[in-house]
Amino acid sequence: MPHLSVARDVGLNAYAPLLLYLLLGPALAAGAILVGKLLGIRSPQSDLKHSAYECGVEPFGNARIQFKAGYYLFALLFLVFDIETVFLFPCVTLFRSAVAGTLDRISGAAIFAELSLFVIILLVGLIYAWRKGALKWE
């Protein structure tokens, strides 16, 4: 078994890039912050310093506008279903390979059962959101 002796002889040389990354990453971040503090322009505190810049238009009114929570809920539901749909593509690719017979590790029936369960869970979530009125845009 010559391949086992190779794994033992690696030692700390295999971890050198990781150690370098762990040391240089925080050092570069701290250096950037320090350079910004040392070379940055300081101006006296004023009300204009903390106001929003609106491309030359004088700001008016309060910047805190209340939005309905339904907008955020709609956006979160979109993200959840969008990301879960993206997860379907690798599974469908595996299913296609299993049906074609090029995948020996798992059967097509097992993949189909898992995909069906996943889609059913998605549909239950969609029906729940629909009945709660989360998909109404008002």
Image: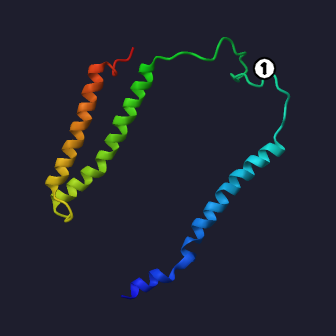
Q: Is residue 85 above or below residue 27?
A: above
Along the viewing direction, whichever of 92 and 56 lies nearer the viewer: 92
Badge 1: residue crowd in 10 Å (few <14, some 14–19, many ≥20)? few
Q: Is residue 51 above or below residue 16?
A: above
Residue found at x 41% / y 30%: 76
Residue found at x 61% / y 61%: 22
Residue 132 in the image: state x and y as whole percent: 30, 20
The amino acid pointed to by label 1 is Asp
Q: Which residue is mark 1?
A: 47
Is 21 situated left or right of 30 in this image? left
For the C terminus, the image quarter is top left
Q: Is residue 120 above or below residue 16?
A: above
Is 89 situated left or right of 19 in this image? left
Residue 13 in the image: state x and y as whole percent: 57, 76
For the rendered model, the colour scheme is rainbow
Residue found at x 24% / y 26%: 127
| Residue that protrudes farthest toward the top in the picture | 61
For the N terminus, the image quarter is bottom left
Residue 20 in the image: state x and y as whole percent: 63, 66
| Residue that protrudes farthest toward the left in the picture | 109
Residue found at x 50% / y 83%: 9
Is 127 situated left or right of 23 in this image? left
| Residue that protrudes farthest toward the bottom in the picture | 2
Q: Is residue 32 above or below residue 4?
A: above
Q: How many marks?
A: 1
Which quarter of the picture shows residue 98?
Answer: bottom left
Q: Secondary structure at mark 1?
A: loop
Which quarter of the picture shows residue 99?
Answer: bottom left
Residue 60 in the image: state x and y as whole percent: 68, 12
